[in-house]
Amino acid sequence: MSRVNIYTFLFCTTFLAIGCYAQQASYPKSKILQKNFSSNLKDQLRELEKDSFVQYLNECREEWKNNPYRPIYHFSSPESILHDPNGLCYWQGNWHLFYQYLPSKDFRQHWGHAVSHDLIHWKDLPIVLYPSPENMCYSGATLAEKDKVIAMYYGVDLGDIVATSSDPLLLNWKKVATPAIPRVKSGETLPYYVFDPAIWKEDSIYYAVTGGRTNTGPGNKAMRSTSLFSSQDLKIWKYEHNFMKNECFLPPGEDASCPYFWPIGNRYIFLFFSHTTGSQYLLGDYNKEEHCFYPTFHGRFNFMSFLPGGVHAPSATSDGEGGVIVIHNMHTGKKSPGWRGITTLPRKLTLDKCDTINIQPYGDYKSLRTHHQHIDKTHLPANKEIIIDNIQGNALEIKAEINIKSSPMIEMNVLRSPDKEEFTSIKFFKDRGVDLVRTNPALKNQRWSLISLETAHSSILPDVISRAPELAPVYLKPNETLKLHIFIDKSIIEIFVNDKQVVTTRVYPGKKESVGISLKSQGRDATLISMDVWQMKSIYKELQNDFIK
C-alpha cells in the first residue's frame, strides 16, 4: 500500500481530527450581538424582559399581526424567514423549538429559538447559534440528557458541529467541536457524506447519522445517504458504516436530509426530508449489535412536491411514552413581505397493532377553543351541497363524524365564498385505493381509502400559486365512520383523518367572505352524525413569562 493510500485509509477509518479544517477561511461573525445570560431561571426571566432583541421580535410580531395570511395559533416567523425546524426537545419543564432563522439584519442561517410549556403557546427567545467559524448554521437535532442538552448541526463549509447548553432556558451555548465531523474537501473521495445530523446515545456511546445524498445510484444518479458515526466524548467521531440496510422504498433522486431517529413502540422510525418529494418516514427494526436500521415500511407527510405550499422538514423528539412528537415547517404559495415561514401543529406519532403509524394533533390546542357551535345528526341527500348555516371563520377547529354508508365520495368545502368563487375542497373516497393485501396480508379483500385536499379554487388572487391535490391513503375498517379533525388558521389547513392520516397545505383566499363550510355526498345518501366547531384564539396575545415553567 502506498504512503498516500495509507494516509487515506487512516483518515477514513479511524478518528477524525477536530482541527483538520483549521486552515479553512473563517467567515464573519454575525451582525447580531451575542449575549451571555445568567444561569438561574429567575435572573434569566428578568433579563429577557429587558432584552433588546426579544423586544425587537415582539415588535415584529405586533407589526405583522394583521396580515390576513399570518396564522394566529400556528407558530410563525417573528420576522424575515423561518426555514427548517430543528432540535425539538423537552428540558426542565419546557418544550424548546429551534429553527433555521435568517434575520433581516444578517441574512444567513442562525438558529432561532422559542419556548413553550404546552407545545401551543410559544414565546420568542434570543438566537442560540450564530454562524462562526462556519458560514451558516444549517439543520440538526438535539439530545436532552440529565445535565445538558446537546445540539448537533451542519455548519456550512465546515462540517457537523456540536454545541451544548445546561441553563434553565437554554440561552447560553458553547460549541465544543468545530467541526466534530469535517465535511469532505473538494477532490476528496471518502466513504461517507457530511450534512444534516441526528444524534442519540446508547449506554455511554454517542451515535450520529448524517443524512443527505450521494451520486452512487444506477447510472451515477443521486441516492440518499445515511452515514453512521460514533463518539465517546462528542469531540472526536469515528466513521462506522452506512446506517440503512436493505432499504428498497426510495427511488433515485431522493435524499435523506433533516434526519431524526427514534424508537416508536417496539420498533424504530427514521424521519427525514427529501428535496424531491418533501417530508416522509421509514419504519423498521434497529439492530443494536450491528448498529444498522432495516426499514420495512415507508410513509409520507407530504404527497406531492413540497412546492408550493407543502410540508417541508421535520423536527422530532420522543414523548417518553413510546411515541414521537414531530413539528414540520410549511412552504409558502404567496409572497409575504416582511415575514415568511410557519409550522404545523405538533403531531403525535404512535405505532398501532398492525405496525402502521397513527397520527394525532398534539399539545394543548383545546385551550384555544372559544365560541363553540354544535350540529346534530343531519341527513346528506345524494348530490346536494348542504351549506352549514351560521358557522363561518378562517381560524377554526372542526370535528365532524360522518356515516358514509355506500356513498362513493364525501366532500367538505371550507373557506367557501357565498358565490363559491373560492373554496378549498376536502374529499374522501371510500375503498378507492390499492388492494391492502399487497401491504398487509391480514387485510385480504380490503382496499385503502383516499383523502384528497384540493386548492385549485382556493384563491382568485393572481399571485397565488395553486397546489396540485394532496392525495393520501388511509385505512378505514368496513363499518368505521369517517372522522375529520380539521384545523384552519388563515393560510394553513391541516386535516387529520380518523387519527390515521393527515394532509396539509397552504391557502390564500382573496375574498374576505370566503369563510363558509358545506358538505356533499356524491351519488348516494350519507349522514352527518355530528359536527363541533370552535373559533380559535391567538397564541400571541400575551407574551409574558407566566407560561414558562
Image: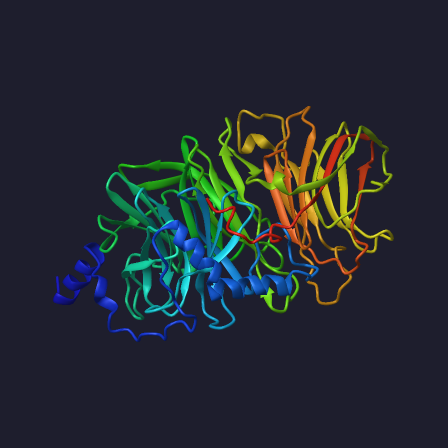
Q: What is the x, y in percent for residue 542?
A: 59, 52
Residue drawn 69% across the image and 61% down it: 66
What is the basis of the colouring in this image? rainbow
Is 95 positioned to the left or the right of 61 in the image? left
Q: Relative to 127, is 509 on the left or the right? A: right
Depth check, front residue: 169 or 337: 169
Nearer-the-camera pick, 422 or 103: 103
User: Toward the viewer: 461 or 249?
Assistant: 461
Please provide percent x and percent y for residue 456: 74, 55
Res. 256 in view: no
Please give the name of the residue rendered at 69% of the width and 55% of the height, measured from the top-left corner.
507
Q: Can you say whether 538 is above or below 527 in the image?
A: below
Residue 362 image position (x, y, % from top left): 55, 39
* Residue at 29 percent of width and 37 percent of height: 288
Count the labels in the image: 0
Q: Nearer the viewer, residue 103 or 537?
A: 537
Q: The N terminus lies in which quarter of the figure?
A: bottom left
Query: Quick check: 542 left or right of 289?
Result: right
In the displayed structure, would residue 75 be above or below residue 478?
Answer: below
Instruction: Determine whether, in the image, residue 134 is placed left or right of residue 321.
Output: left
Q: Residue at x 52, y 44 (%)?
A: 119
Q: Is residue 451 above or below residue 191?
A: above
Residue 389: x and y in percent read 85, 41
Q: Would residue 8 be visible to someone looking at this image?
A: yes
